[in-house]
Image (tube, rainbow, N blue to C red):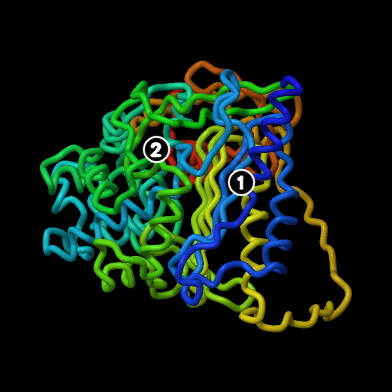
Amino acid sequence: MGNEQGMMMKAMKFLALAPLMLASPALAQPLSEAEREAVDAIISSIEVGKAPGYAIGVVRGGETVFEATDGLADMSHGNAITPDTVFNIASVAKQFTAMMILQLAEDGRIDLDEDFRTYLPNAMPGIEDEITVRQLLRHRSGIRDIFDLWGLTGITWYENRLRNREAMALLNRQTDLNFAPGSDFLYSNSNYILLAEMIANVTGEPFYEVANGFFASLGMDDTLVRRRYGVVIPDLARGYMNFGSWLENPDIANTQGDGFVYSSLTDQLAYEAILQGAPGPLAPELIELSQSRPEGGGYGFGLEHTDTNGLHDIYHQGSTGAYNAYTLRYPEQRLSIVVLSNASNLPIVQAVNNIGIALLGDALPPAPPPSQPSGPRNVVTMEAAYDAGTLAAMEGRYVNAETDTVIVLEQGEGMAFTMSKNGRARDAVADGYDRLVWNNYVFRGVRDEAGNVIALSVDNNRIRNVRFDRED
């Protein structure tokens, strides 16, 4: 970056850090001088360097009271990020898919407690369990995550033009679940892809058209679901990663419902204002339902609920390639903080959390005293109940028809194995009885009554117990 461009960047950052003093101060509660200084100090800790950057803003009492931007939207042209710059908001988009489902439920077109295949016939025919729409919304369906399934097959999803069509083809081959529906929680992007397909089927229109109409009704003119990879998006911030030097990281995949919504800080803050009571087309009852804490806590309608510092907060983070986004709400205090970024290495989540704490002020309860250890810790060393001879039984060829994937295990020296997945060899190592690990994958041997290894059970992040039957 030349000196002239560097000076431009500093100027843009300085101007962007100026808070917005808007109308209706009694409602908006503009930042006090002390709050402004605290927020500025937190934001200054986000060291953007030469590129790229972020856009961050605060809504309080139904009004935007602060905005800041820094960095570049496009390194090749030196375009600075502004509040109107458009980012991929990744999984933060799930709240909008959920809101569209709730609208259809309010209109009587969907029952949240019906099996989702009532509205999407022929989906996942190999799964006999009833899976309700509500279980999809809350990630309690047991359906395996599509991106981890693609990874299991050897597909690097972010390097391929994968769409809902390819996702449904793989999901429709599934014959088992991570767990019985409703019995557990495990985040799965598949749930929200299925919800998008439901919306399209119920309305008779492509999901992206329904979604873009929804955003238009809210006045979110910068926000859209991308129809396909290659569509020109005005004012788009390109995604970048820094591995010693900056590299562009395009978002080639284009699944819908789970993410791939493109939006600006201006639009996201406008939506937060509507949730806090600013004029808009959403009925108050619908807003209240969408933000309600689910029974038992945890994940609700495209949003996570927890208690932080003694206060109920609602949040969601999104990450796709180089893009990162994070929304944090304190509903009872009518406070929201939103950040969008086109760089994968910026500490934006920590910054937003710290801004929330700084602005809550007297609403925060006193910090509890630090807990004291009850006594000395007893550390017990367990001797491994396995050896190289036992592990040799895991050598073989294993097949999973759901993903059309073949795994071949070959034992090396001692506890070392070569694991070939669809012909791609990797080094795995034993770390337990009949158990091998490679990266996030765990391979467990399944033995019959005679003690023979007849199958592998494979886990990886958001997929569990994927069975590979032995074929030697």
Residue placed furthest toward the right: 376
Q: Is residue 414 left or right of residue 98?
A: right
Judge whether 10 appears above or below 76 on screen: below
Q: Looking at the rendered structure, which numbered label has been put on residue 46?
A: none
Residue bearing the label numbered 2: 260
Q: Disc 1 on helix, strand or loop?
A: helix
Answer with the quarter of the image where residue 232 lies. top left
Q: In this view, does 180 lie to the left or right of 79?
A: left
Expressed as whole percent of the image width and height from the top left, the position of residue 31 reads 61, 67
- Can residue 319 be seen here? The reply is yes
Q: Which residue is at a point 30% across and 38% down the rendered structure image?
A: 171
Kindly identify the amino acid type of the residue bearing the numbered disc 1: Ala
Disc 2 or disc 1, which is closer to the eye? Answer: 1
- Residue at (33% x, 72% y) in the render: 288
Image coordinates for residue 180, horizontal then vertical, percent: 35, 58
Residue ID at (85%, 69%): 378
- Residue 314 location, x and y as percent? 49, 65
Q: Which residue lies furthest to the top in this view?
A: 423
